[in-house]
Amino acid sequence: MKRNLFLSASLFCAALTMQAQQVAFEEYDLDNGMHVILHQDNTAPIVTTSVMYHVGAKDENPEKTGFAHFFEHLLFEGTKNIERGKWMEIVSSNGGSNNANTTQDRTYYYEVFPSNKLELGLWLESERLMHPVINQIGVDTQKEVVQEEKRMRVDNSPYGKFREQIGINLFKNHPYRWQTIGSLEHLANATLEDFKDFNKIYYVPNNAVLVVAGDFEVDSTKKMIQDYFGPIPRGKEIKRNKYTEEPITSTIKASYNDPNIQIPAIFTAYRTPANTEKDAYVLDMISTYLTSGKSSKLYKSLVDDKKMALQVFAFNNSQEDYGSYIIGALPLGNTSLNDLIAEFDKEIAKLQTELISEKDYQKLQNKFENNFVNSNSGVEGIANSLARNYMLFGDTNLINTEIEIYKAITREDIKNVANKYLKPNQRVELEYLPVAKPEN
């Protein structure tokens, strides 16, 4: 009887938790094409205002890469009504914080303020969109900032170019073959008009989604949105190129010498489907199964039991057009890179020929449900999820339903997807090596 009562109570609590996780939102379009999403949560006196633009590295001219990331910096320079260099000062002096980030698919800006400063957040983002000042002083300043960022995060960082090298080898036609930071040479050679043209094409209301999430009053917020964003003219319709890649049918062998490392690494990378495909969700589960946590299969085998690797990881990088599934490791002792590949393949072969255990399957489900709950635990994360789900997945309500996709994945799906995408002849094998020291 006590067990039944405990079980009933547990199920009741779980049901309440899932119900509480439902994120209520309203969405609509302004006449200029800007999409607006509102999520009201009056439990704490904070509010997030954010704008996501559907422009990333994949939208760049192959001869002018790095523009999307460059604009992430450039559009903090100032506007017609915000003095150059004062943006951050305005935000911090009003108790707020802000940031921005760029991927190969989109660019995202956001502010978090006390709720009584909502109008300030809306004004700042409308200024960024309507009145940016793009001049030579700002361009030259941000070129130096981006150069330093690339030196710190890529050029002088151990293993800093592994993503770049994987992209170059995994994609031949698609712009995913270059990284968001792009080419410093391209940025150095770009003219002021090049930057102005990029802004004119992509930083338009009909290429953006505005999210307000947190403590606000709906009717007054809608009026402010209309007042600040409604007058901004609609931009021209954006023509986007479509790129397709031929299937990889034989292993692509590649190597790269990094002067910043002493221990080599091996990376195997597979081209995978767009983030909207169910198979992409299954690959998320596979990467978690293989290397998430000390009890994961590859970590336990290579790091704990066999002492063959210092570190091992796997992740599924799902994107709008294609994804990349990467497994990597650093060898320990006399272990060769080929030995590590052989161990990767043993675990993958098990996935391809056997169903994972019910216990492991339930652990995966529990992890993904926990991740889902945590991702919606604050208004800042909710704002990001709402914008991303609308722009890159075409379904804002994924914020409430995405967990059902993971729940619907079966052990048979995991086996089938491993067979479909993770074959040795469908991958890049990148040997990431130290620079050989000259002999005395």
Image: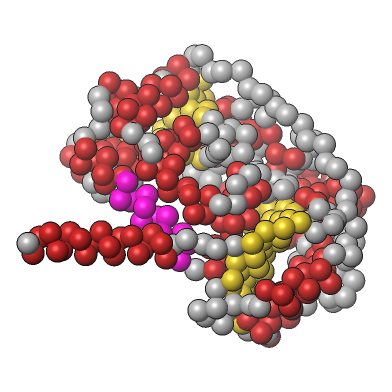
Main SS, magenta residues:
helix
Q: Which of the two residues, 431 or 262, is positioned nearer the viewer here?
A: 431
120 sits to left or right of 351: right
Residue 133 in the image, given as x and y percentages of width and height: 88, 65
Percent x, y of residue 184: 73, 46
Queried whether the magenta region covers residue 370, the answer comes back as yes
User: How is the structure coloured here?
Assistant: secondary structure
Residue 146, located in which quarter of the rendered image? bottom right
For residue 365, above or below residue 349: below
Taking depth in this image into account, of 83 and 408 the one nearest to the observer is 408
| Lateral position of residue 73 relative to residue 152, left or right | right
Q: Residue at x 54, y 68 (%)?
A: 379
- The magenta span reads 365-377
Q: x%, y% of residue 337?
A: 36, 29
- In which quarter of the view is residue 144 placed? bottom right
Q: Determine whether 225 is above or below 246 in the image.
A: below
- Please state, as top left, top right, bottom left or bottom right, where the C terminus lies in the image: top left
Q: Quick one: which residue is furthest to the right in this view?
A: 193
- Residue sitting at x 59%, y 62%: 25
Residue sitting nearer the eye, 380 or 303: 380
State the image coordinates of residue 85 (x, y, percent, origin top left).
78, 74
**Residue 33 in magenta?**
no
Question: Among all residues in the image, which is located at the extreme left?
Answer: 1
Image quadrant in which you'd find residue 264: top left
Q: Residue furthest top?
A: 249
Is residue 401 visible in the rendered image? The answer is yes
